[in-house]
Image (cartoon, rainbow, N blue to C red):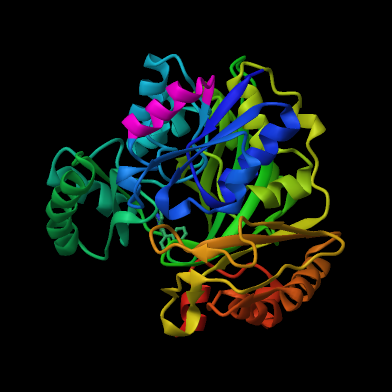
Amino acid sequence: MFRRILIANRGEIALRIIRACRELGVEAVCVYSTADKDAPYLKLADRAICIGPPPARESYINIPKIIAAAEIADVDAIHPGYGFLSERADFAQICRDCKIEFIGPSPEAMAKLGDKVECKRTAKAAKVPIFPGSEGAIEDEEEAVKVASEIGYPVIIKASAGGGGRGMKVCHNEATLRTNLRIASQEALAAFGNGAVFIEKFLEHARHVEVQCLGDKHGHAIHLFERDCSTQRRHQKLIEEAPGPLIDRKRRDATCEAAARLIKAAEYSGAATVEFLMDGKQNFYMLEVNTRVQVEHPVTEMITGVDIVKMSILVAAGEPLPYKQKDIEIRGHAMECRINAEDPDKNFMPCAGRITTFEPPGGPGVRLDSHVVTGYTVPPNYDSMIGKLIVHADDREQCMNRMARALREFNVGPIKTTIPLHQRLMENADFRKGGVDIHYLERLLK
Ligand code: MV4
């Protein structure tokens, strides 16, 4: 096992990784920008190193500064968390060159799955369900028009190097397809330095269902079942839950097993999430693979009992996964509400500032992953998530009741948060029935 790890992140996920390190008996070194210099979680690390001013490009995503801190602290490995450098294959390669273990996949596996065209190719070979569309990147316009007429409109143009909703264009007819192709390719080149685009069938009403996977360096890969993350706004998830509601056991198992096959085929080690869209008939279509530990990993931890962050460290150190697929079972239901310092009544405007009231909920089945304490000041430089409230119960109904109860106990002020919106959703009849689609929240907020 590693002696010492550097955590190249901040906030709640830095704290989550510190906690995993402590339980593993591994020393944790944190880096911080001057905006985070008073953050309370830094005191829980074995060491904290200032890496620069508030802008992320001068601190948390500045590779020379991160590597310098790792060298100074003499760490064996770097955990990137999520966001920042977590999905940068170039960073994983630099870590390798510096003989520091990157806690995540190899640069090769990351690049293979991070490129959507390559990822779809690998998925198809592994018999993972994908949307019908172009085989690989579009080489010429006539080919795209031919594919579109075969699969039928609407189609969607996506950038191979895009992700999280960036660089997508829906086309309802041949004329718009032709115009959008040129624009999309130019935009992709400007935004990602890669102009490759592909097309596939566009699905209007869908749920976002993603499968948590783990792979090790010995060729083993397992899945930890799925999460439903359909309650989102502008590609920002607000609520995630596991298992996905109203999914039949056979469909679930087939999809989750397919996801694990893809991770195995890519010779992937670490935590990965295979994203799918699910239509009204429970057909699944793969979207993309996230090659990192995700924000919403706790809901899967709660239903399976597997510590995903610990596993990410363990497999990076070369340990085999201590679970076989048959060891993994779904126990009860878990839900996570993202608590953001934002005002839902003012178009989710971020609310940086000092938190003078912070009264966290507790009691049975309640988990709060947050770096915030009373007197904490939310800096304006980073995302506005101040914590995640996760609850676990025997079934979905009790889970929502428990969440509503925990949200009532949770008192944060004077800054505005997403807590009241979550309370509203826990009482919403459509949400309570389960199975709301990816557009539901945006329609509700109109
Ligand atoms: C789609 C789609 C419909 N059809 N692909 C958005 C983020 C990126 N991961 C893929 N996305 C979508 N791809 C096809 N063929 C609709 C979306 C989409 C979406 C997906 C998941 C969660 C929220 C979304 C919101 C808008 C569009």
* Residue at point 60%, 67% (across, down): 375
Residue 206 seen from this side: no
Q: Position of residue 88 (x, y in %)?
A: 37, 34
Span of residues in magenta: 63-77
Camera-side residue: 43 or 16? 43
Q: Is residue 213 above or below residue 166?
A: above
Camera-side residue: 299 or 342? 342
Q: Is residue 388 above or below residue 200?
A: below
Q: Which quadrant does ligand 1 occupy? A: bottom left
Query: Is 12 left, or right, of 398 in this rendering?
Result: left
Name the image quarter holding residue 137: top left
Q: Is residue 320 magenta?
A: no
Q: Position of residue 93 (x, y in %)?
A: 37, 22
* Residue at point 59%, 70% (across, down): 436
Q: Position of residue 356 (x, y in %)?
A: 60, 74
Q: Quadrant of the N terminus?
A: top right
Residue 351 seen from this side: yes
Majority secondary structure of magenta residues: helix
Query: Is 124 left, or right, of 331 in this rendering?
Result: left
